[in-house]
Every structure is written in structure tokens, then in C-alpha cells.
Image: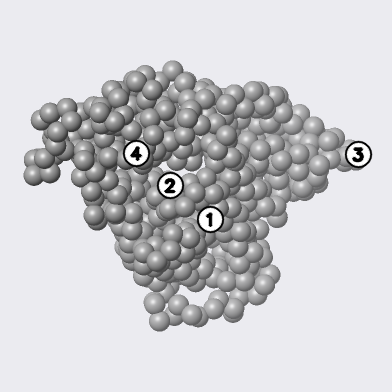
Amino acid sequence: MSYDDILNSIGGWGKYQKWICLLLTLSTIPNGYFTMILVFTSKTPEHRCRIPEIDGLHGENATLTPFNVSGLSEYIPWDSKNNRFDRCLRYNLTAKYGFNETQNTTGCDFGYVYDIVEGQLTAVTEWDLVCNYSYVKPRISSVFMAGVLFGSLICGVVADGFGRWPLMIASTYLQFIFMGLNIFNTSPAMYAAFMFFAGGCSLNNFVAAIVIGAEICDKKHRAFMETSAMIGFCVGYMVIPLFAYFILEWKTLFLVTAAIGVVYIPYWWLIPESPRWLITKNKFIKAKLLLKKIAKFNGVNEDIDTFFTDENLFLMSNDSEKEEKSISDSQGNEKCWTKIPYIQLFTHPGMISRTLYSCCSWFVIALTYYTLSLNTGNMGGNDYINCFVSACVEIPAYLSVYFLLRRKGRRTLMISYLLAGSAGCIITPLIMRVSDIGGIVTAMIGKFFVTSAFGLVYLYTAEMFPTVSRNQALGITSMFARFGSVIAPYIIYLGDTNGRELPYTIIGSFSLASALLNCLLPETAGTHLPDTYEEALEMKSGRCMNLRKRVRKHSDKELKEDDDTSSVFAA
């Protein structure tokens, strides 16, 4: 008897699973607002040089200094390109009240004046991270994403070796702790350090929640569980602009959002370990007790001890080992050195291009997604509304993946999403020149399709690679996604220094190139998951001329089974 058989006998989607699904969904909300909190804590408002003759010296009623005052043209040159006073230069005056327009300009040696309301303070305004020090801001964002990359490297090892529950609980609590420590920041370096460790914890918490949910419910509801977790992330994303609108001081914003962590203290007792993991680690007694608890909560009154015999549990624990052995035997003629992790992905004939194309897709999707998400402050209009709308479009995006997967092929959807996202990004700079609102609309259209591609790429990648290397393929491709997220802040920085239209042109071009590369990847809808490289290579790579071809030859039953047994948003 398999684990799925036992799970179905005690209620694979009973009250207990629904309760845990709700708790896990709520646990992903902080991941959303902590990932996007940098949009507001590191926000760069409009600024200009401080003029002592007009504004007083730095520290003299600094928070009350008006940004727009008369007489600035005598002290600050006009930036005709951006139609505003220069942000980083002032005239080099030789006398207190005298000036000469022919004299050279100088930097803002008396500090800066920011266009902010009373009480508003960000990391940028506190440490003057503008002009010559503007490069520090993208570095902090990149360090946070580097922490996410670090977390992705250790996440699988910890989850498999020590359990899903310890990883989720520890990461959840540490995430709140490191975010809360930002109230003690005294320098950008300390700020970056806290964000690095918080980033490392945020991914681990999110992944562990999805894995626990997927392993505690039946296969028909795994995609629903994972979709719920993604929607929880979106809710957190939607919440952060509301918090930031009412909490203007950046350290207070960190304090309030981190204090919410007390709500998750009961998770220590409420969230269970994965029964599947307990069985694979031969922890039969704990697995039996947990499965009985689930059965009782679900109202299963029949005598179920017969399902929980030590013999059945032992057989289930060896299932994965037998599968790995059979796969190893089928690959027995391969050289020993090819069994080194990741080697076959880059050396096996026919798989090299597939691996490289997949890595490029993950890189581009993550780069585009985080550039659009973190760049809402540069779109024009209201920053808070922009961020809120950007979060709102993600919910229908993930739902579109959930429903369209049953009707369309994976490759067809992926190419369509990337082409549509590319079009939205590329036309955004053109629309921005006419209307800020129009530019926001087209950018959000691009965000919708790129988010959909992000939701699909996990499943598509998992189905292209054989069992013997599937986890390795997901690991290496998701690592390239983290590289994209690390670079995204610098794409935004290029927009700050070279015009706000530039980031959209860059990510739109990358998305277009990625869509063309996906034309060379195989369609996987309606096929069984391959166990060997030979089976994986039987899936023929497509061509761009077949883009409009629909995968309808497979029965609805095959597609349904394929969707039920695969994870849409697997970690």
C-alpha cells in the first residue's frame, strides 16, 4: 500500500488538510511584504542641493525645509533634459549672495533637500544615498536577493536532512527577527547585512510551506495548495503599500511589520511535520501518530490501524530507494564521472541545449519580474497605488496558469506569456512619453504575463528533465533565476541615471529573446514524466512555425492526470 493510498483512506482533502492549507497560506503573507518592503524603505524622493542662503544649513529645520522655493534658478542649474532643477549640482558661488552663471558647478556639499512630507524618512534620505552615493541603494537590494540565492542553496539540504517543519519554523521566526533588527541600523552596511540574512530566511520559509502542504494533501489538491501559497504572497505584496502609506518613517515600518511575527508563534504547535518525510526517514512511530491524528480530525471512524502497520510504513520508506536503484540500473553503462551532480545536464548529448535554454528562461523571467516589481516608484503617478496594482495583477496571473494548464500546452503557454510580456514592456516607454497612466497600464500588462510565466516555469522545467536529474535541473535553473533577481536592482539603477524608459526596453528585449529560445524546447503536456535521459529526449523540440499548434491530440483524462500529479509552483 502506497502513502497516497493511506492518505486517501484517512481523507486526502479533509478538514485537517484544509486547516493546514489555511495556516500555510497565511504564513506566506509576510514573504510578500518583506520582499517588496524595499520599495518604500529605500525610496528615493525628488531632491536637490541644499542652499544655505535659502534653506539654512543641514540640521536647521531640515524636515521642514520646503522643496520648491523662489530664487532657486540663481543657485541651481536647470536640467533641460528632464525639465527640472538639477538634482546633484549647484553653482559654485564665490560670495554668499553673489553668483555668476558662467562659473563652474559643484556638488551638493551642504547636503540635500527632499520633496517629502513632515515625518517621512527613508534610508535614502537618512544617509543621503543620492548622486555620488546613489549606487549604494541597488547594492542593498542586490544583497537582499543574494541572501535569497544563499537560502536557495541550503534550503533543499536542510529540508531533506532535518525535516520540513524545522526549516519552516526557524526560517519564519528568523525572518521576522532580522527584519526587526533594522530598527537599530546605523549605516548602509548594517542595513545590507540584516537584509541578506532576512532574504536567506524568506525563501526557506516559503518553500517549506509549499512542500508541507503538497505532502500532506492528496495529489488532486496539490496544485490548489501551491496556488494558495502564491496568493498568500500576493496578499502580503498588496498589504505593504497600505502599511507604508500610513507609516512614513522607514524604521518604524520595519518595526510594525516585524512585530506581526508574534501572530506566528503558535505555528510551533499548529504546523505538523510532513508525514511523507517522517516515513522516508524511518520515523514510523511519529508518522503513525500523525496519520492517526489526521484521521481523527477528518472524522474517519473506521479501524485504520491496519493501514499503519510497520510493514506498510517500511515498504513505503523504501519506494524511493527502489525507484532510484532502477533508474541507476538503467543507466549502468554510463561512466562514473557522469554521476557527479549537474555534470550530465551539461554533458549528455541532447540535454546541453535544453539545460542552457531553461537556465536562460529562468534568468530572464526573474530579471523581468523583479525589475517590474521593484520599479513601481519610477513609473510616475502615485507610488503606493502603483505598488498595490502591481500586486493585484499577480492573483489573476497565477489563476490563469492554474486553469489554462488543463487546456493548453506548456510550451505554447510559456511562449505566449513571454511574447505578451515582452510586448507590454517594449511599448511602455513609448506610451510613457504621452501619458504616465498609459505607461503604468502597459507595464502592468507586461507584469501580468511575466508573473504567469513565473508560475508556469517550475512545472515546465520539471517535466522536461528525467527523474534521475529533475531536482538537479530545478536547482540549477532556479539558481539562475536568483542571479536575475540580483541584477534587477541595477537595471532599475540604469533607469535612475539614464532615463526611466531604459529598464523596460532592456527587460522587454530579454523577454522576446527568451520567447524565441522556448520555441526550441519540447512540449510536455499529456506526456508521462520521463525517468531516463532517453525518455526525456523522445520529447521532440519544437520550432517557431509550430507556435500556433495546439496540443489537442491528448485526451482530457491524460491532461488531468498530468496536472494532478505535477506541481505547478513546486519549489
Residue under circle 2?
377
Distance, label 1 to label 4, CA atoms, is 49 Å
Badges 3 and 1: C-beta atoms under 8 Å apart? no
Q: Give the colouring mode of the picture.
A: one colour
Q: Amino acid at mark 3?
A: Asn
Q: Residue at x 76, y 35 (%)?
A: 291
- Within 10 Å of disc 2 (Cα), the crowding (few <14, some 14-19, many 20+) is some
In this rendering, the label closer to the viewer, 3 or 1: 1
Q: Is residue 347 placed above or below 36 in the rendered structure?
A: below
Furthest residue in direction right, as rendered: 301
Q: Earlier in the sequence, mark 3 or mark 2?
A: 3
Q: Residue at x 10, y 30 (%)?
A: 94
- Within 10 Å of disc 4 (Cα), the crowding (few <14, some 14-19, many 20+) is few
- Displayed quadrant of residue 197: top left
Q: Earlier in the sequence, mark 4 or mark 3?
A: 4
Residue under circle 4?
69
Badges 3 and 2: C-beta atoms under 8 Å apart? no
Q: Earlier in the sequence, mark 1 or mark 4?
A: 4
Residue under circle 1?
455
Q: Which secondary structure lies at badge 1?
A: helix
Position in image of residue 185 (x %, y %): 40, 20
In this rendering, the label closer to the viewer, 1 or 4: 4
Residue under circle 3?
301
Q: Earlier in the sequence, mark 2 or mark 4?
A: 4
Q: Camera-side residue: 375 or 194?
A: 375
Distance, label 2 to label 4, CA atoms, is 24 Å
In this rendering, the label closer to the viewer, 2 or 4: 4
Q: Amino acid at mark 4?
A: Val
Q: Amino acid at mark 1?
A: Gly
